[in-house]
């Protein structure tokens, strides 16, 4: 049994941690929220040079094909450093969809550019308040052109390519849209997160290229991305715990370190427990993703719910442990508190995944 | 990443499985499996003893014990593999022997002599000798070192006076490991000494405690001028805390076992219970709770995989091993609560014809004990905070103070 990352992946993870520390990814996130959105792609080309964008892209298409386990390990570090890089949008979602469903021509056209960091991409599904109504969406494709409004689209302002969820003849489909083409207008929208720029994208008879039809493909892509995002969530939660522990050791009140009070100890111990459970569930999901196991739908839902729960606990209790300081703009606690909400809602909230989990168990996808 | 056993592990699992298939039946999830018969039932003891002998003869008792003490000289991994397999079978589950096998004997291996150990080892392996742990007292539970039972030297003997409480299986135990205070002028952790106590000694009185579940697994044990020869002392005089801690460390590790109902059982119940709105499994409120229980159950399963990975590579498991008991006892209580809620008013019924022999109702009453025994939830959180996260100790009013001067109530001593 080897239920751990392989050594070469661990080595890559250490490298990623070093790079994100040296380039101060957290500060880049702060630049974005303070009005310099270009900071999100500041290191994109360098990340591509290090091979981070090509982990699941075949070598003949410009990637390195190292695999999903490495991508999960990298996601953990990106989440821990609350990096604003458009990795989830460009790679976990769009590159993933292209690898799995793209025609040769589509792959040739987009994957090398993504792998080499020449472009970034975004995933456009939500449509403002109508998102609450499940798979219904108003965006329509007819005669090869798309009309509709998508918002919020994370990383949508800067991306060259969008993967858009739309209806055509009453069926859900995924469409590739070039965002610099005519018929596309973009506007910044305010979101809770702020450390990734979000767009409202209006398509007015914009030309599309069909990637794949069917709800199944959409579900498949989302559950695969959910595994990588679970690692970002666990990484973020771990960063919150580390911040809270460090603060609790050095902050004195009533003549002693606040970490010596049981009220603080128990809070932090609960964070540790939730994170370790989430980490273990994420590991299993990484295995299921990398082997295309039949357990994947249940494993992805379990990892996502567990990671979301750990991140929520860690993000809010990190603020609480820091007291008034934790509520200031100046400290980084709010970056994680914001990111938690973004990751929880991207790909659907708990209700969606609870249903997917229980349905998966009902249909016997895993042995109980 | 993979979940396969090592070739040796797979071979061991195959053999264990074959042994179990030869002697027992697999147990279906709706049987209320794993439900413990009351430990005060002599018939249950006899059934458990018979099973223990079969295991011992086949080499599945004392798996990790050294060979020189009649053990198998096996690895912790083999022990875990055997337990994983055994959990799926319908076998007598009395839990009469786990203290002797998992706690007491390993403590003797470290602190006693070969002659003494060999007197007991073979009998413990076969269930012919039962051991208990005489630690907790009315004045010392979570604060174990506050214990007051006195040990006074008298020639070659020690004379013991005082009282223990929460002694698992004390009523049928043959021996116990006792920690007592030999010096009240020392600081609380320093004046303690450990002994092997023959429970049949004159002056030992055992009184079962009736728990909220109605069972009597625990006891009070009273000592009235009980004599223990100095040859049965474990460790040096004054080293009792160190000796007691070896046993406690074993206890923490061993307590991470699954007590029913497990997830499969609560899932099975929800799948087969019809509410006014349809199957309980399709009710959104039930789904939310089940999904959460599943996440915690799987989180523990895979955390154990991480532990097994480390063990199989000859590494020491990481700090994640510390979460097991805290997580498992919490979800046990919540499963019991949810399982009885599904039946509305009839969820109160504790009749044998309730699903799984009223497992959920019984578990509702026995689960609080699992959040207390072997380290309360609160003590375990302190341990994680201090040992794993490195947070400073709380302010202590009893540190460096002679035991006799430590306050014990609002009006002082």
Image (tube, helix red, strand yellow):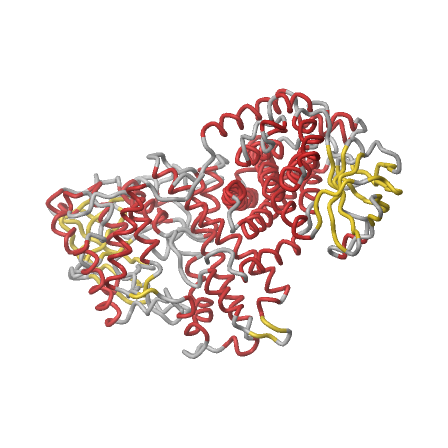
Can you give x and y, in whole percent of width and height, for residue B326 in the image?
Answer: 46, 51
Residue B124 drawn above or below residue A107: below
Can you give x and y, in whole percent of width and height, for residue B325 in the image?
Answer: 43, 51
Residue at point 40% right, 42% down?
B307
The residue lying toward the viewer, choosing from A135 and B138, is A135
Residue B122 drawn above or below residue A61: below
Can you give x and y, in whole percent of width and height, for residue A367 in the image?
Answer: 46, 57
The residue lying toward the viewer, choosing from A200 and A117, is A117
Residue A161 drawn above or below residue B348: above
Residue at point 24% right, 48% down?
B63
B313 left or right of B376 in image: left
Question: Where on the picture, by quarter, is residue A191?
Answer: top right
The residue lying toward the viewer, choosing from B72 and B365, is B72
Whether residue B121 appears in this view of the structure is yes
Can you give x and y, in whole percent of width and height, for residue B363 in the image?
Answer: 44, 66
B244 left or right of A191 in image: left
Residue B84 drawn above or below residue B261: above
């Amino acid at each position: 049994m080897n239920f751990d990352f392989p050594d070469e992946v661990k080595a890559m993870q250490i490298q990623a941690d070093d790079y994100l520390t040296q380039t101060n990814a957290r500060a880049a996130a702060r630049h974005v929220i303070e009005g310099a959105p270009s900071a999100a792609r500041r290191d994109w080309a360098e990340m591509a040079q290090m091979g981070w964008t090509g982990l699941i892209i075949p070598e003949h298409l410009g990637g390195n094909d190292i695999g999903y386990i490495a991508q999960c390990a990298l996601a953990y570090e990106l989440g821990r450093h609350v990096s604003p890089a458009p990795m989830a949008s460009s790679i976990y979602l769009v590159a993933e969809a292209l690898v799995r469903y793209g025609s040769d021509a589509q792959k040739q056209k987009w994957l090398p550019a993504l792998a080499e960091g020449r472009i970034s991409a975004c995933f456009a599904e939500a449509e403002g308040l109508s998102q609450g109504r499940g798979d219904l969406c108003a965006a329509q494709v007819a005669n090869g052109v798309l009309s509709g409004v998508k918002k919020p689209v994370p990383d949508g302002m800067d991306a060259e390519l969008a993967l858009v969820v739309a209806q055509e003849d009453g069926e859900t489909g995924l469409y590739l849209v070039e965002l610099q083409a005519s018929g596309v207008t973009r506007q910044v929208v305010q979101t809770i997160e702020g450390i990734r720029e979000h767009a409202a994208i209006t398509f007015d008879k914009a030309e599309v290229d069909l990637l794949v039809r069917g709800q199944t493909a959409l579900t498949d892509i989302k559950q695969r991305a959910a595994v990588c995002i679970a690692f970002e969530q666990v990484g973020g939660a771990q960063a919150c715990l580390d911040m809270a522990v460090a603060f609790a050791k050095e902050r004195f009140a009533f003549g002693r370190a606040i970490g010596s009070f049981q009220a603080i100890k128990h809070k932090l111990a609960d964070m540790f427990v939730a994170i370790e459970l989430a980490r273990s569930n994420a590991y299993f999901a990484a295995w299921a993703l990398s082997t295309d196991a039949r357990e994947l739908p249940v494993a992805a839902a379990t990892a996502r719910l567990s990671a979301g729960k750990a991140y929520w606990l860690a993000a809010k209790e990190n603020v609480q442990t820091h007291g008034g300081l934790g509520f200031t703009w100046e400290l980084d606690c709010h970056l994680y508190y914001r990111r938690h909400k973004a990751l929880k809602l991207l790909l659907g909230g708990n209700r969606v995944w609870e249903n997917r989990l229980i349905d998966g168990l009902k249909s016997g996808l895993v042995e109980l | 990443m993979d979940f396969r056993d090592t070739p040796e592990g797979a071979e061991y699992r195959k053999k264990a499985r074959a042994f179990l298939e030869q002697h027992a039946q697999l147990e279906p999830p709706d049987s209320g499996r794993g439900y413990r018969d009351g430990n005060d039932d002599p018939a249950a003891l006899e059934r458990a003893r018979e099973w223990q002998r079969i295991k011992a003869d086949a080499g599945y008792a004392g798996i990790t014990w050294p060979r020189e003490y009649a053990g198998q000289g096996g690895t912790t991994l083999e022990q875990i593999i055997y337990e994983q397999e055994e959990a799926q079978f319908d076998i007598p589950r009395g839990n009469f022997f786990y203290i002797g096998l998992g706690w007491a004997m390993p403590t003797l291996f470290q602190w006693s002599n070969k002659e003494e150990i060999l007197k007991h080892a073979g009998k413990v392996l076969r269930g012919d000798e039962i051991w208990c742990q005489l630690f907790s007292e009315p004045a010392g539970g979570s604060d174990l070192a506050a214990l007051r039972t006195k040990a006074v030297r008298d020639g070659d003997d020690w004379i013991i006076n005082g009282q223990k409480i929460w002694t698992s299986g004390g009523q049928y135990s043959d021996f116990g490991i006792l920690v007592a205070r030999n010096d009240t002028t020392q600081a609380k952790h320093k004046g303690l000494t450990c002994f092997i106590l023959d429970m049949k000694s004159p002056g030992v009185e055992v009184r079962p405690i009736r728990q909220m579940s109605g069972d009597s697994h625990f006891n009070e044990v009273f000592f009235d001028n009980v004599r223990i020869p100095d040859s049965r002392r474990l460790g040096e005089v004054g080293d009792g805390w160190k000796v007691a801690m070896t046993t406690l460390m074993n206890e923490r590790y061993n307590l991470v076992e699954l007590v029913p109902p497990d997830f499969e059982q609560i899932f099975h119940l929800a799948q087969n219970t019809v509410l006014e709105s349809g199957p309980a499994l399709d009710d959104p409120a039930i789904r939310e709770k089940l999904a959460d229980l599943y996440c915690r159950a799987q989180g523990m399963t895979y955390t154990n995989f991480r532990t097994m990975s480390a063990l199989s590579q000859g590494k020491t498991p990481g700090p994640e091993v510390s979460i097991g008991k805290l997580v498992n006892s919490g979800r046990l209580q919540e499963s019991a609560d949810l399982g009885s809620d599904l039946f509305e008013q009839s969820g109160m019924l504790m009749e044998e014809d309730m699903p799984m022999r009223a497992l959920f109702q019984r578990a509702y009453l026995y689960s609080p004990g699992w959040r207390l025994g072997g380290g309360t939830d609160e003590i375990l959180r302190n341990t994680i905070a201090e040992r794993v996260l490195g947070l400073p100790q709380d302010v202590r009013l009893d540190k460096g103070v002679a035991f006799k001067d430590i306050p014990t109530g609002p009006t002082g001593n």
